[in-house]
Amino acid sequence: MNLRARLLNIQAGGQNIAILGETDASSLGVHSSDRVKITFKDKSIVAIVNVAVNFARGSVGLYEETSRKLEIRNEDEAEVEAATLPESLSYIHAKIRNERLRENEIEAIIKDVVERHLSGIELSSFLTALYIYGLSMDEIESLSKAMVETGRTLSLNKKPILDKHSIGGIPGDKTSILVVPIIAAAGFTIPKTSSRAVTSPAGTADRVESLCPVNLSVEEMREVVEKTNGCLVWGGALELAPADDLFIQIEYPLAIDPMLLPSIMSKKKAIGATHVVLDIPTGRGAKMKTIGDANALAADFIDLGKRLGMNVQCGITFGEQPLGSAVGPALEAREALSAIIGNGPADLREKATSLAGMLLEMVGKSNGKQLAEELLKSGIAERKLREIIEAQGGDPNVKPEDISIGDKKGSVVADKDGIVLWMSNEDIAKIAKEAGAPKDKGAGLLLKAKLGDTVKKGQVLLEIFAERSPKLESALKLADRLQPIGLSKKPGDRMLIEKIPTVAVHKKTFILER
Amino acid sequence: MNLRARLLNIQAGGQNIAILGETDASSLGVHSSDRVKITFKDKSIVAIVNVAVNFARGSVGLYEETSRKLEIRNEDEAEVEAATLPESLSYIHAKIRNERLRENEIEAIIKDVVERHLSGIELSSFLTALYIYGLSMDEIESLSKAMVETGRTLSLNKKPILDKHSIGGIPGDKTSILVVPIIAAAGFTIPKTSSRAVTSPAGTADRVESLCPVNLSVEEMREVVEKTNGCLVWGGALELAPADDLFIQIEYPLAIDPMLLPSIMSKKKAIGATHVVLDIPTGRGAKMKTIGDANALAADFIDLGKRLGMNVQCGITFGEQPLGSAVGPALEAREALSAIIGNGPADLREKATSLAGMLLEMVGKSNGKQLAEELLKSGIAERKLREIIEAQGGDPNVKPEDISIGDKKGSVVADKDGIVLWMSNEDIAKIAKEAGAPKDKGAGLLLKAKLGDTVKKGQVLLEIFAERSPKLESALKLADRLQPIGLSKKPGDRMLIEKIPTVAVHKKTFILER
């Protein structure tokens, strides 16, 4: 059937979508979600049908992606015919019915994800089924490999290549900004990519962006690493595992994260990592709640590493409270820079040198943690970070106080004397976001007390920073309502952690950063 | 934030979608799938964010649904602000985590489905989770009620109101075209709604459309029923349970049908049914494969009926082969009309009078089947069908041969002598669809042999009809490849039903008609 192209001059998020009126769809015998083959001159593509009410008969609506691929202009006539469904869709159906998928089936799915042959509805069902049934290690391996194969890779002529990654989940985790220069200063290669915040107040890419540009291409990244041994770049623009970027778009509204392992590990494989340390923050407010859960996840990461030809070790880290004091892109960049200069919070330095030490021992150094501490104390790591900042296009002489933070400031004070008994990661993240983080880089908060600290009534517990007064006001109000820090004279004094009303509350924190 | 409206003049399938460029989305702090509130003058709506690459900064793209609700024109300035996610989404998240949903939660979901506040991605995940976990009877009841409450209802000042429905699954099932006039001729009210084909070669609405118009409004339907006691109309335009129409759009590409019970029963409730007979075709090629499965489903239908205040009985019917001989809209209409005149196939008449008999006994008649047979034999049911046809706007004097069928015709013959041992419903449906059904009304096939029949080599097994020669050719080719009818001299002669190659085939028939 010949139909006139009606160009919509707008992108459909990458998907090939063909809009048809009801009559034309019926003549073609297709429903919404069926596929049609559209041919114009020597080009043809398969598109997902979207039947629109009252859409002009005799025309086919095309989004930019589709019209560009076909090189078709408005009013050009294209041939449209019913096409078969992609074979990968039948594998998705199999997964919905709880069948184990084989490698070639997973390859077909991932290829069709990247080529945008599967709709959001289909991917949503696939990811939901994966979340509910869980994935076998064979499936995880196949997914990881297929995600690497369908993306770009970084090939450096060096070995070993080290990497560090956190599964995410606690606010203020700026460890990578210390680990990368320590490892690079020790003479090892560490081409670190990070994500931006999705559900959190700051991702590492957001933090680093307060120090230097992070939107580098694979070629620029290679140059930086060849010059300095390391980098701290945003992974999102590199297309290392483009399937994952599409999965995240679907997982976000569903608040599920079934692709955690293949997502992280495919990107490590894509940059050629040979030795990886995975940080698994564990605690009440973290992704992993118990040491048992963390152990199980660690075993999976290590097994997957072996299958992908990478040496993986995991660090289970204390995740009951934010790391350091600062939460929010600019505040965290300041804190990380202070820490590498020698003034930052002890927990951040301890965690960074512990994880860096693990990496160093994996590649044959003895006393890794001690070596990492020396590189930090001596200022060698600081010089390395400045080298990296400069190579990425930032100011190598940047001082913590140069990093601008929100000038609207307010405080939350203790309403009684006491010891800090618990702290809600979730509530602290919410308050920082309410203040404007991550989109307002200077927004966030500073914790003035941490677990175990003794505070007096009236003493400041946290300082909130915002770029705009209304944001500050609402963050302060939220802090007042949430009471994110639990104070008591003795642990036994306050036994009730949370009240469950007669009707349980379903809302649950969801952390997509990975 | 004020953004200029950019109208897309195209419908988004009912959803409120707002397209934002990356910069504006980031300033608002929203990602794709987040919600924004759009205000123009005194109107405001909540829309689902779709972040588009390269979309003009300072503007918001609006589909027709959204611009119409806002009464906004191109270039008008609207206020756009971040909005919270609908509460129903947190209930969907709860279901993904396998929590049982309460009545108020299900009401919130269904309300938001109908008001288009939930995206296809979110609905897909919800339906997948329902499919995988199954639904409790409380959830099914709540879904059914909420689907009735959010739709239109038919209120007739009559009692009892009878209805009959098949869960679908076998080709050629034109029973309703006989049951409705039998019941109406017996003096009872039966306002029957049917669906069009989604995955099958013909739905009852498609069949009836070869006799008279079926696209009636609720008001027109009421008039027909008040005049004749019955009707045979398409349910799709009536908005009896609009949520279900939206669910079907999602279930179709996923090949799952978790809403079978609420979907059917909400529509029975919406037309005010008090007594319902449900036909559950059972057999190898039907939706229900075993009598055990059929019994379990029947128990659920009966229980749900009680909860919704309807008297429900189920008929488990022989589903190993198509009903009658004809498959395809016009061919089936011909056959149904012949049967009511007195010449149709025995199995069709037997099934129709059995189910009609059950209904008649439910409302107090004794010897229901006998009464149904008498109404059929005497021509009273035929006169009633012609009354209904006339009231719906068709020709009351229509003869079977008036119904035009495809003039391209071909035959499949037996390649040996034998007895018909088995017949594949699925393959027969595929062949009829390949011939052009349901979009080509005259396309389809006639079975010239049925289970147990003895045939000679060279004898015709099925005749294929098409409106277009290429369709006929490909249907004949498909029939040749599929061999949908199994012949043998004695049952023991052909023991192998299907070969499974080393790699299992995942493809599975999916029947969405309900």
Image: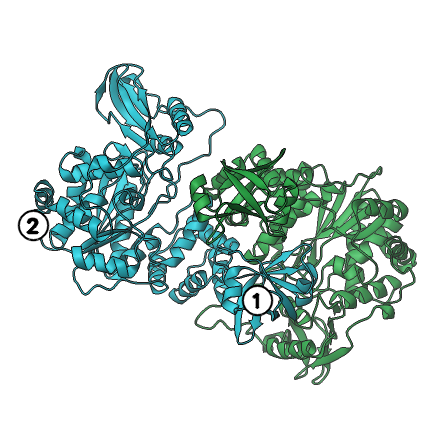
Chain colours: A cyan, B green
- Residue A366 is marked as 2
Numbered disc in front, either 2 or 1: 1
Res B287 quadrant in image: bottom right
Q: How would you rate the neighbour count of disc 1 (Cα within 10 Å): few for under 14, some for 14-19, many for 20 or more?
A: some
Q: Amino acid at mark 2?
A: Ser
Q: Position of residue B411 (x, y in %)?
A: 72, 80
Q: Is residue A291 visible?
A: no
- Residue B234 is marked as none
Tell me the residue at 68%/74% (across/down): B420
Q: Is residue A147 left or right of residue B363?
A: left
**Residue under label 1:** A73
**Kind of element beneath mark 1:** loop
Q: Amino acid at mark 1?
A: Arg
Q: Is residue A222 visible?
A: yes
Q: Is residue A509 left or right of residue A323?
A: right
Nearest the eye: B235 or B304: B235
Q: Is residue A239 left or right of residue B82?
A: left
